[in-house]
């Protein structure tokens, strides 16, 4: 309080400004951490997608090689699978 009974408004404003600055820095830190976590998750997902694509391509290559090695068996398996599927879903 000053000598006429009033509180020092300037000091109160400085305290509020300091608290606001502290709050701004805290929010900025939280946002930065969130952005870093999002980037980490994104890079992990890209890695998982790439691995799935590689494995899928390898599986297609293996099946293609088996079909080329045994074409009659492949046709018989495809026919049997289609026939069984048709019988199951027709009912």
Image (tube, rainbow, N blue to C red):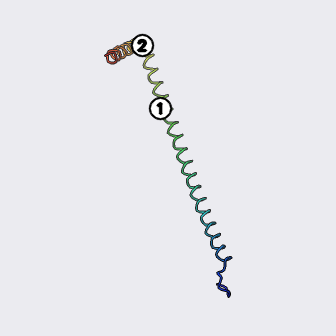
Q: Residue at x 51, y 41 (%)?
A: 45
Q: Quadrant of the C terminus?
A: top left
Disc assigned to residue 21:
none
Q: Quadrant of the N terminus?
A: bottom right
In the rendered view, tell whether residue 29 sits above or below residue 13: above
Tag 1, which secondary structure?
helix
- Looking at the picture, how far across and down is residue 6, in whole percent? 65, 82
Out of 69 and 42, give the one closest to the viewer: 42
Q: Residue at x 48, y 28 (%)?
A: 58
Is 63 positioned to the left or the right of 35 in the image?
A: left
Out of 72 and 20, give the one closest to the viewer: 20
Q: Between marks 2 and 1, how big is the CA–CA gap?
A: 23 Å
Tag 2, which secondary structure?
helix
In the rendered view, tell whether residue 68 sits above or below residue 18: above
Residue 10, quarter of the rendered image:
bottom right
Disc 2 marks which residue? 71
- Looking at the picture, how far across and down is residue 83, in whole percent? 35, 13
Disc 1 marks which residue? 55
Out of 88 and 57, give the one closest to the viewer: 88
- Looking at the picture, how far across and down is residue 30, in whole percent? 56, 58
- Looking at the picture, how far across and down is residue 81, in whole percent? 36, 17
Out of 54 and 68, give the one closest to the viewer: 54
Q: Tag count in the figure?
A: 2
Q: Residue at x 50, y 36 (%)?
A: 51
């Amino acid at each position: 309080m000053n000598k006429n009974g009033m509180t020092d408004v300037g000091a109160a404003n400085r305290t509020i400004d300091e608290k606001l600055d502290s709050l701004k820095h805290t929010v900025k830190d939280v946002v930065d951490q969130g952005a870093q976590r999002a980037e980490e998750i994104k890079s992990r997902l890209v890695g998982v997608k790439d691995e799935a694509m590689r494995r899928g391509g390898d599986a297609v290559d293996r099946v293609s090689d088996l079909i080329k090695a045994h074409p009659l068996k492949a046709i018989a398996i495809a026919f049997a699978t289609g026939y069984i599927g048709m019988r199951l879903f027709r009912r």
